[in-house]
Amino acid sequence: MTSYRRPFSFLELSDEQCVRRLRFRKDIVRELSNVLRQDLKPHIRLRTALSVATKVTIALNFYATGSFQSATADISNVSQLSTHRSIRQVVDALYKRRLQYISLPMTREKQVERRAGFVRIAGFPRVQRTIDCSHVRLRVPQNHPEIFVNRKGYNSLNIQLLCDHQRRILAVDARYPGSSHDSFILRQSSVPTLFSGPNQDCGWLLRDKGYALSTWLLTPLSNPRTAGEHAYSDVHSATRCIIEHCIGIIKQVPLPGLLWWRITLLA
């Protein structure tokens, strides 16, 4: 007869252990549990029903490690099936609340704030946001695996991100496989419409030379020659690196494919 193992949760961790295992402070995990409580609370009164705290712990541990679900199941004292269900429930609950926390504010005040913030970085005027794409590794998909192979030879999603001067993510597009070119993803997204029409954004978007130059998208010069061109390249690089720093921070916490699939363009 199999003995019952009491599920584990972050409530049993110290603050230091919580940061090490879940990548968040204990008070932040507690706040997240409270936010998601209505969606995660058990619908039946059984001893084996997982608590909200346990489900959040399982999901955050899986996000933090990027490991297999079975490893997270062993740590949390639950089955692999319960681990899978908990991760999906937390992802769905987070996605349901996405517009409360992720948005691309277009008010005049926010535009002025972003322009001023980017100017303080390196003096580049009228910048509203920076953009880049990053490949997120996947297991080999069952359907059309060939389209997920990127130029480096492994399976991935090509994720487009936009951020502001404080490295806050303003928009994400995770719809396209690794073989998709960055410029194609941009054209298919709603980003170009932000800079056209009656409510257009007043400023520029900075990107590397993988894109074509346009009236709203500024790229670096391939071969600067004059002092002015070198100055432009220097401040462009210093400003655009904000998105590279942002992506670097995200990749310190590997996100599983399930979560990336649930993120859509929010602009």
Image (tube, rainbow, N blue to C red):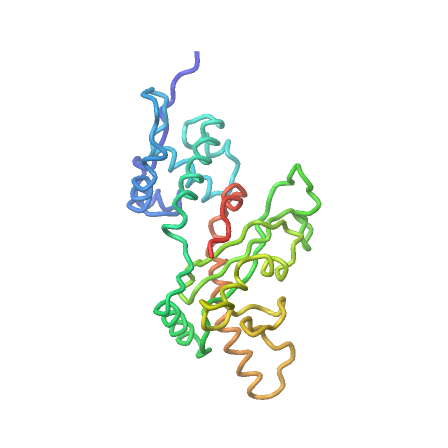
Give the number of marks.
0
Residue farthest along the top direction in this orientation = 1
**In this view, 66 is above or below 43:** below
Q: Where's the N terminus, which quadrant?
A: top left
Q: Which of the pair 200/6 is nearer the observer?
A: 200
Residue at the spot 48% in from the left edge and 32% down from the top edge: 84
Residue 263: x and y in percent read 49, 48
Residue nearest the viewer, comparing 78 with 108: 108
State the image coordinates of residue 106 (x, y, percent, origin top left).
40, 64
Nearer to the camera, 79 or 1: 79
Name above or below for residue 244 compared with residue 77.
below
User: Residue 88 placed where, x, y %?
Assistant: 46, 35
Q: Is residue 89 left or right of residue 178?
A: left
The residue at the point 63 percent across, 59 percent down is 184
Judged left or right of residue 50, residue 208 is: right
Q: Is 247 placed above or below 215 here? A: above
Tell me which residue sits at (55%, 87%) in the image. 228
